[in-house]
Image (tube, grey):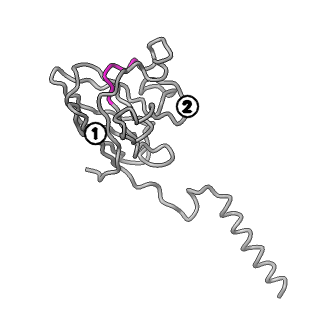
Amino acid sequence: MITLLFSSILVLVSGIWVQAAQPIESRNHVPDCEIVAAICRMHNGTVNGVIRLSKQRVTAPVTVTGEIRGLSPGLHGFHVHEFGDLSGGCASAGGHFNPYDKRHGSPRDDNRHVGDLGNIEAGADGVANINIADHQLRLCGPISIVGRAIVVHAQRDDLGQGGNEESLRTGNAGARVGCCVIGAARLQ
């Protein structure tokens, strides 16, 4: 009887130890995040638009599509910034989202901020149509961009090739002319 009781306690303690040693994601078979779409509505004076983000399957890139109006013609830096705090306007959004402490770069670079999405181009009518697919963006998990901000800058992003320190931090993209907070949405 004592041997049976001791064996039962040993099995119980072993089970608790194994459970505690597993990563949190595997405990209780927690399903992967179910966010597959997000939206960002920009209303900053004359700069307005809607940006949609979606992911069709686990291994697919996040697709960023939409339209922004009210921009000056030409290229504009386009980034995910670290905070969804717009209480002080776009300045409160912090720097580019950079969870791995990398240098600023092109969306095609492996060594870049997660939030580096390059440039969008506004036509003579001030409208920029966006269609980007990015493998570093995430809608779920510890580096999710949901709840962070998208910022449109006044100038072209030099993609870290400007030859100075600011280029390696921000791409010399200049002032923030539009921003919005990324929120979970229904897939459309």
Q: Is 120 part of what is drawn in magenta?
A: no
Which residue reaches farthest bottom? 1
Circle 1 residue: 51
Q: Main secondary structure of the magenta part?
A: loop
Q: Which residues are magenta?
A: 152-158
Q: If the image is split into quadrants, where does the N terminus sit? A: bottom right
Residue 125: give x, y in percent of width and height. Answer: 15, 24
Circle 2 residue: 101
Q: Viewed as shown, does residue 119 lie left or right of 81?
A: left
**Residue kind at label 1, given as amino acid type:** Ile
26 w.r.t. 46: above or below: below
In-front residue for pair 117/15? 117
Residue 124: give x, y in percent of width and height. Answer: 16, 20
**Residue occupying image coordinates x 31% and y 51%:** 185
Q: Viewed as shown, does residue 128 lie left or right of 36?
A: left
Element assignment for label 2: loop
**Residue occupying image coordinates x 55% and y 31%:** 101
Which residue reaches farthest right? 2
The mark nearer the N terminus, 2 or 1, is 1
142 w.r.t. 106: above or below: below
**Residue kind at label 2, given as amino acid type:** Asp
